[in-house]
Image (spheres, rainbow, N blue to C red):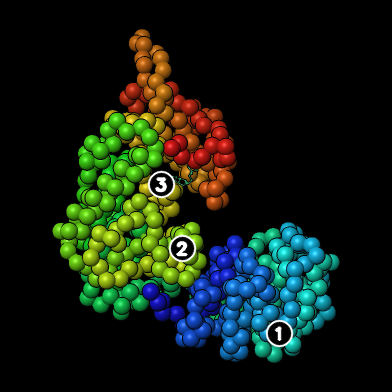
Amino acid sequence: MNTIQQEKVIVIDFGGQYNQLVARRVRECQVYCEIWSYKTPLDKIREMNPKGIILTGGPNSVYLEGAASAPKELFEMGIPVLGLCYGAQLMMHVLGGKVERAPEREYGRTKVILDPVPSPLYERFPSTMTCWMSHNDYISQLAPGFEVTAHTDNCPVASAQCVEKNLYAIQYHPEVLHTEFGKQILSHFVLDVCECAGDWRMDDFAEQQIEAIRSKVGSGKVLCALSGGVDSSVAAVLLSRAVGKNLTCVFVDHGLLRKDEGDLVESVFGNDGPYDLNFIRINAQDRFYVRLAGVTEPERKRRIIGEEFIRVFEEVAHQIGAVDYLVQGTIYPDVVESGLGGESAVIKSHHNVGGLPDLVDFKEIIEPLRDLFKDEVRKVGLHLGIPEDLVLRQPFPGPGLGIRIIGDITAEKVKMVQNADAIFREEMKEAGLERGADQYFAALTNVRSVGVMGDERTYDYAIALRSVNTVDFMTADVTEIPYSVLKKVMTRIVNEVDHVNRVFYDITSKPPGTIEYE
Ligand code: XMP
């Protein structure tokens, strides 16, 4: 859906690995920006009336047939253009310069030497700086009207410009933190060259989205599947602020949530909560437990939970009948993961929402967060007054505790892991470590062993505690939780949680371990 923005920069996506970062850095300059596919028609770009255009990196070679390209007119609209890496090469190629395979690939931190040419991008910079390079091709000949503004030992054109036409080409990656002054370079482009005001805030985004949704939806009916996670919660609140009671939120409690989590979601979104919306909670715990009884294989568990969820939702959707819009909490990383770049609406393939569009009779999907990064979504959530407990929560897998109980699932085991997990979280908070780890939880190993409680021999379960620090959840280090905290958690769990007689702290990093157990 379109957003109402006075002033924006368009990032044109050529499929490079740092594209998300480019958009992020522009927003850090307090300039609104959107990412669009390189396939976006020129007329559409013109219609958006951007103050500036940034062409990203990409994996292709501009001179090969079928390579992602851009029309010459893009550079002739009078709108400032900054090309980065592939984008820089493309600018040269399209405007009459030459790009060739470099004798040697240039990769990693590289010393860039600025040429004695005034450039608005390098205002008050030292004469050399360290930059992040990653390219196989190089600009061997400038397009007419351009001048070189920097070079490296291997690369004659590390950057070039045509100031008169506001066209700038940079071979290295200013968006990557390894590039010294990278943020200043982007800031010089958007604030000085494009003359953006730099007064945009995440709060503005929320208010503008509310206005845009209100004028689009009018008195239409909107349906939102609420998982209680950050993204769907923020999307739901935005919608409720825009359309009030025309929004219906459906929350399915599958009985595999953390302790008291269903009640937390209900206290925020339910009829006694602060938002004026229709809230439907379906307590479907028993249905899930029946279907999961005796199932031990992790992927089968995941599939059953997903399928049952769809069935429950289908029944509710049937009762609600046709709606005009379906809300999805898709965020930018979901769009990227889908492999479609920034080019089209994508359905989030999370078990909570995957497949919903097939079940619900609706006209259009609304994805109010699809241009945002996770931390930006959190900022919007805080601006909207959603409780911190919900907005700052750690990731929780869609299949929930279903993949934190090794082996078969029973209501009793769910209770064990919920109680142990709640104790672990309480003690982490008590120790001031609540935000000191990125994800931490208790899991139920399927191991039973002999123990002794009072004078009694026990034959009970072992709980595993897991806590990791990670940036992207692809790799993770184990949190070095003080021994005194672990000891307290162990004592409380064995005393307070029935049928648990041992507690392990998992010290395996990822890789070779994964974060979850199944
Ligand atoms: P792993 O276990 O693969 O987890 O190291 C990486 C991150 O992904 C989350 N995760 C899931 N999330 N459905 C989800 O919605 C799943 O099936 C699933 N499996 C893992 C996990 O919590 C961690 O943040």
Please name the amino acid that badge 1 sits on: Gly
The x and y percentages for residue 307 are 29, 47
Q: Which residue appears farthest toward the top when viewing the image?
A: 455
Name the one closer to the observer, 452 or 319. 319
Report which residue position mark 3 lands on: 396
Q: Residue at x 45, y 36 (%)?
A: 517
Please name the amino acid that badge 3 sits on: Phe
The circle drawn on residue 335 is 2
Q: Is mark 1 within 8 Å of ligand 1?
A: no
C-beta proximity under 8 Å, tags 1 and 2: no
Label 1 CA crowd tier, 10 Å (few <14, some 14–19, many 20+): some
The circle drawn on residue 96 is 1
Compare marks 3 and 2 and give the one earlier in the sequence: 2
The x and y percentages for residue 191 are 61, 79
Q: Is mark 3 within 8 Å of ligand 1?
A: yes
Name the one closer to the observer, 384 or 349. 349
Q: Which residue appears farthest toward the front when viewing the image?
A: 65
Mark 1: secondary structure:
loop
C-beta proximity under 8 Å, tags 1 and 3: no
Please name the amino acid that badge 2 sits on: Val
Q: Quadrant of the N terminus?
A: bottom left
The x and y percentages for residue 406 are 40, 32
Q: Residue at x 32, y 24 (%)?
A: 498
Indicate which label's residue lies in the foreground, 3 or 2: 2
Name the one closer to the observer, 96 or 324. 96
- Asked if residue 111 lies left or right of residue 274, the reply is right
